[in-house]
Structures are given as structure tokens and as C-alpha cells.
Image: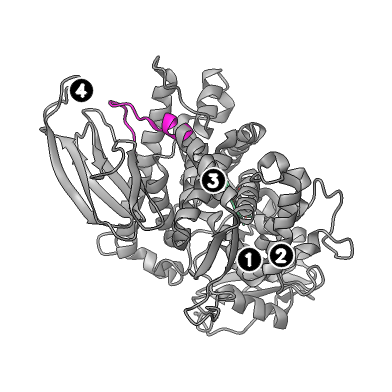
Amino acid sequence: RKRLPPGIQPLPGPRGIPYIGRVHDVPTNTPWLKFHEWSKVYGPIFQTEMFGTTHVWISSEQVAHDLLSKRAAIYSDRPMIPNLPENRTSGDYLALLGRTETWKRQRRLCNHLMHTSALASLHSYPERERNRFLFMMLRDPGNYLEWIEQFTSRTISRLSWGTTHTAQVLRHTTFGLLETISPSGALPNVLSFLRHVPAIISPWKKKEAARYRLEEKLFRTNVEHVAKRMGSHSNVAADPSFIRTFLESKARGEEKWGETEEAMHVVGLMAIAGALTIGSPIQSFLLAMCHYPEWQGRLQAEIDGVCEGRCPTWADREKLPLLRAVVKEVIRWRPPVPTGIPHAVEKDDIYNGYFIPAGAVIHALEWGMTRDEATYPDAEQFNPNRWLDPSYPTFRAPLTQYPNLSGHSQFGFGRRVCQGVPIVEQDLFLTMGGLAWAFDVRKRRDAQGHEIPVHWNDYSPLLISKPAVFAFDAVPRSEDKVGLMRELFEEAREEGERDDVVPVGDEAFGESEVIVETDAQGNRLRGGGSGSVAGSEESDHDVLINVRDSSPEPELDFRASSPETDPDEPVDLDSEPEFRDEVVGSGKGEKFFMMMEPAVSLLEVQVPGAWRWG
Ligand code: HEM
């Protein structure tokens, strides 16, 4: 124990057990509720000890600004994550890096890439993907989680590498990373001595190593793919993306953005951040609409008044302050990162007579800040009016500009503030606006006409938290809107298909998707596969085939055909290959296959009887 200077006290906090600290009554589910409860007892800044580490919990925005922003010089480090011990130094994940030169360089690059895409209003990708998303919701609202996560991972894949082919693999590796780093995801993050268990017998290390290998391969092949397209004389140029912006800057001789190897990781981290986080508030919006139908009605009235029947677009944002207020209120009401992402303090410090030791882990407890009654009266209630009505402390004019998400406590403090806000803002505005325009979202009723209850606050325990699945109805608001949704989807699909061609011979990570449409009776109208996976003779691909059929009745056979090849023989891409046919699965619903196919040059999926197969 350090001897404290005279008159200086340790921070208050719950007493712990010697050597262990206070862990036994922190629930693994929703730990932020417990920390918030303690903040009511010990004040807006208190500390807990956990296995020898001091954790400081801040639940006042003012205190967070005083320390994390005003004293950013010593409060901008990150703690070591026991289950990913290289996180501070490896340069793989910018958001988890310590306050090093690598972090500064990577942050500058991230800023440049984000700024370039934001100026091009993110290349219309969020709008195109939103249009696809609404149509998926129309066909099969019960599968909403799938459509939301597809929306976020497809949008960020386009932004990162200019393609959606990478979306499913990204989703897979990213959710694995979330487990690796979350306190409730991997035991060594709580019992940190477990990190010394040798890799050969550590289930956590083995799992992480396999995940990392796949992720690294995904990132590397994506960069190579874009570079090749940019360099090729073919007519399929690379679509705009973060990595294209980087490669163009480099081609212009701008050395300040660093090496391609590093940019690969920066863009990878941006993709991870986008795939992980944005889905949570979209789900929370659906939850809010079930509990607050009156706000849904007001939101629909605003959209109908301004857009006159059209689905809202990003260009409408100035005229839709209530929609922006709903976006902001969803983030406040159910913050997706309720404990914040921790900082670490590098030197001993004193704040208001309290001692904060060097190395302490500093948590800006978002759940606590957003429940501060002085700033957010009646904080438990979902009330977008707090951003629109001058009688609330959070009101800000002019309403053509405010409310917006920049500066919101949920995006962090000081030098580590989140760099993804332009994407979050646009994605949430478009999806929430689109959903309210298209559907009446409401609680489902059982056969007797009784409402089926929807939970109020049942959220997953990982660092980025999302609501438990719940049942609701999403009823299209009119036949006109159904027609418009179909048209918007067709447009998005046509554009998407043009972009989605992966030429044979390119090294690319592949995803193939088959969508089958049905009529109200469940008869298959048409369906088709898009995309194929292509590789060169050196390739050794993991191939994901993602086949989807929501028809209630028919069973489908999914066939994958790939050329007969000898792994040791180079594939002659110009010759007509002999195809080996293989049924890789049958059934209905989503199929997700992971196959190791050495030297595959073409792999196709066909749905028998369907309109088209690709
Ligand atoms: C709802 C969505 C999101 C939420 C709630 C969120 C929240 C956060 C939080 C709490 C932090 C840590 C701030 C701090 O340490 O003080 C952070 C950091 C970061 N976020 Fe986000 N984020 C979101 C989406 C995104 C997206 C789409 C990107 C894409 C580029 C992104 C990129 C980053 C980066 C690069 C950092 C690290 C900054 C650093 O450590 O220097 N975020 N985010």
C-alpha cells in the first residue's frame, strides 16, 4: 500500500476481500447495474479492487471531462487485457493500443480515412444497404437480428474494402474478438493469472489463435484484392473504400500515412468497430417502439409530413429533428457500451483530495452518466423531447443541426474519443427512419388477443451489449410502401450485383448468398444466388456459402460444384473444368457452410427450381 500525502484520502468504494478484492457480488450479467448502484452509495467517482488492480468508476460526465479530457496527457492509456496481452503494443487493434507512437500514427490515419468517406457522404453505402434491410424485414421480420447484423456488417465491409463479400467472415471473426476482450467473455479477463496457462492446454489461447488466423487472412486478402483491382486494366475498378483511399494517398507519394501493412490493421479495426456496435441501438429502437407506441406515431407524422410518402434519406436530416432526437435518445436510454471502454492512468494523480494510483483502470460508466437525474430528468423513461424542448437541460438550438451524436458521452472522452460517429449517425438515422416510415412496430398478440410481454432491459453481458431477442410484429403501413420497398430493394440489388462480381483468378474472400422469394402462400416465386468464390492456383480458401430461404414449406437442396482439381496441379483457368458436384446441405432457413477447398477456382451454389442460380 502506498503512503498517501497528508490530507489525501483513497477514493471511497466497497470493501473487498484481501488479495481478491471485490468480485464476488459483481454479477456477470449486467455488471453495470451493480456499479451504478454503488455510485449511488459512494458518489460519482469511486474505486473497487479486483485481484490487485484498482478500478475507478466515474458516473458523472463532469468528472469524466475533468480527468479524461482535461488531464488527457496522463489519462489516455489503455489497460492490458489479460486474454489478449499484446493489445497495448501489437498495433493490431487501434482502439486497444496503449498511448504509443503507433497509436498516434494509426489514429491520424483513421481520421483521414473517415473524413474522406464522410465528405463523400459515405459513398451512399448506408442508404443502399438500408434499402436492402427494409426489404428483408418486410419478408421475414421474425429474423430481425440476422437482418440487422447483415446490414451493419455489409455496410462496413463496403466502406472498408468496397465489397459485401467479406461481411459474413467479418461478422464471425468480430464476434469472436468481442468474447476475447470482454470481462464476461473469457475467464482470464477476470482471473488474470490464467493468462500464464501454456497455449497448448489453454482453451482461450487456442480459440483466439484460430480466430486471429482467420481474421488476418481476411484482412490481407481484402487489401490485396483492392490493390489488384486498382492496378489492373480490367473494367472492374475498385469501389470507393477506406483501403482504396489509403492506397491512392500512397500512390500520390504521401508517405505520412505509413505502411500498407499497418493500414491493413487500421482499416480492419474500423471494420470490426462498425460490425460490432451499430446493431445494438437498432435493436433497442425496436424495443423502444414496442414500449412507446406514442413516440412511434409522432415520428411517423414527422417523416410523412417532410418526405411526403418517400422513405427518408440522409439529405432530409436537417428537416427531421425528431428522428435525430430518437436516434440520440435510443443511445442514451440503452447505451450499447454501458461500461465504456476503459482508459488507464499513467501517473499517480490527485482529484478533489482523493488519490488515484498510477496504473488504475478508469471506467467512464456510461450507464451511470445517462441516468444522472440532474441532466436527464426521469432518466428511466424514453423521452426524445429532452433534446427538442427548451425546458430540458439537454436542449440545444438550432434544431436544424441539433440534436446530433457528436460529443455524446457514449462515444468517450479526450484523446480516445470514438472516430466512427459519422458512420453511426448515418446508419442509425437511415435505419430508424426507414423502419418508422415502413412499419408499425408493436407487441405481438397471442391467439386470445393478449399482448405477449416484451422485456424492458434484458441485455447481453459482453462489452458491447444488445437486447435479448423478443417477439414483435412489424406491419407494413400501406400497400404503396410495400411496392416502394420492393423497388428500392431491386435498385440496391442491381447496383450491388454489378459491384459483386468477383473475377476468377482474383484472390478474394468469398461469400455467396442465395435469396429465395415466396408469395403469401409460401410458394417459391423466384430466387437466385449471387457471387461466386474464385481463387488462383495458390489459393487455399475458407469458403462461406450463405444460403437463405425463408419459405415456410419447401425444402431445398444446396449444391456446391467445384472443379475436379489436383491440389498439386496448377489450375488452367481458361480450360473448361470438369465439375465435381456435391450436395453440401439441404433444408430450409439459413445455411452457413465453412469449407476448406484447396485450389478451388470456382464454386457455385444452386437452388433447384429457382429462378436463377449463380
Ligand atoms: C454505436 C456505435 C459505436 C459506439 C457506441 C462506439 C463507442 C466507442 C467508445 C465508448 C470508444 C472508446 C472511447 C474512449 O476510450 O474514451 C470508442 C472508440 C473508438 N471507436 Fe467507436 N463506437 C461506435 C462505432 C464505431 C464505428 C462505426 C467506428 C468505425 C470506424 C468506430 C471507431 C472507433 C475507434 C477507431 C475508436 C478508438 C479510438 C482510440 O482508442 O483512440 N466506432 N468507440
- The amino acid at mark 2 is Trp
Main SS of the magenta part reads loop
Asked if disc 3 and disc 1 are in contact, CB closer than 8 Å, the reply is no
Determine the residue positioned at 58% across, 38% down: 110
Of 286 and 178, which appears nearest the observer? 286
- The amino acid at mark 4 is Leu
500 in magenta: yes
Asked if disc 4 and disc 3 are in contact, CB closer than 8 Å, the reply is no
Q: Position of residue 364 (x, y in %)?
A: 66, 64
- Give the distance between the C-alpha atoms of the residues marked 2 and 1, in whole angstroms: 7 Å
Query: Crowding near pointer 4: few (<14 within 10 Å), some, many (20+)?
Result: some
Name the residue beneath numbered marker 2. 295
Name the residue beneath numbered marker 4. 573
Q: Position of residue 342 (x, y in %)?
A: 59, 61
Image disc number at residue 289? 1
Of 123 and 522, which appears nearest the observer? 522
Image disc number at residue 171? none
Q: Circle 1 — which element?
A: helix
Asked if disc 2 and disc 1 are in contact, CB closer than 8 Å, the reply is yes
Q: Circle 3 — which element?
A: helix
| Image side of residue 361 versus residue 306, left or right | left
For discs 4 and 3, the disc positioned in front in the rendered view: 3
Identify the magenta region: 495-509
- The amino acid at mark 3 is Gly
300 in magenta: no
